[in-house]
Image (spheres, helix red, strand yellow):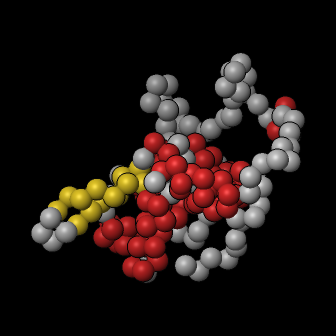
Amino acid sequence: MGRTADYTKERCSIAATLEVVGDPWTLLILRDAFAGVRRFEQWQDRLGVARNVLAARLKTLVAHGVMEAQRYSERPPRQEYVLTRKGLDLSPVLLTMADWGDRHVYGVGNGAVHFVHKTCGHQFHPRLACEACGQVIESRDLRRVVHDDCQTVGEALDAVRGAAE
């Protein structure tokens, strides 16, 4: 599938995330799914990605439970792809990546897309907050704790696959 890295032996949640959504094109497929794209031909038109690459990425997203294939036509057989709860949980990741690109590549306000908070009407920029106390956090507010007995990415993904079967 054109993979450039194998993260299965790592013991890291970032590597685990990359193992699921880090392939080329995958994040753009997810970006478009959040924008309402559900059908293969729509992604093909928007991204211009090779059909075999797009099919492989969608198959991987379905296999990992990030998207679900739903049949919308019997003749000819056709399916569309919808984000699952697991897929919807990637929204903050994509919003943060978009904000980073806006700040550090395009310059604030110069990117092709921005988001507006419906409640207050202001342009949205994501911030991380502690789930327990609600305090907005910066990297300096965190302490890293390493668990040496953690499974490898490959072991963890195998366990998830086994539980799903």
| Residue farthest toward the top in the current orientation of the protein | 133
At which x and y percent is residue 131? 67, 25
Up/down of 38 relative to 92, above or below: below
- Asked whether, in this view, residue 140 is left or right of residue 126, the answer is right
Residue at 50% from the left image edge and 45% from the top image edge: 86
At which x and y percent is residue 95? 57, 46
At which x and y percent is residue 99? 62, 48
Residue at 15% from the left image edge and 64% from the top image edge: 74
Q: Is residue 23 visible?
A: yes
- Asked whether, in this view, residue 146 is left or right of residue 153, the answer is right
- Asked whether, in this view, residue 42 is left or right of residue 150, the answer is left
At which x and y percent is residue 152? 74, 57
Residue at 44% from the left image edge and 30% from the top image edge: 118
Q: Is residue 106 visible?
A: no
Choose between 82 and 106: the one closer to the eye: 82
Please count the marks in the image.
0
Picture quarter containing residue 80?
Answer: bottom left
Up/down of 54 relative to 83, above or below: below
Choose between 100 and 140: the one closer to the eye: 140
Residue at 30% from the left image edge and 70% from the top image edge: 41
- Which quarter of the image is occupied by the N terminus? bottom right
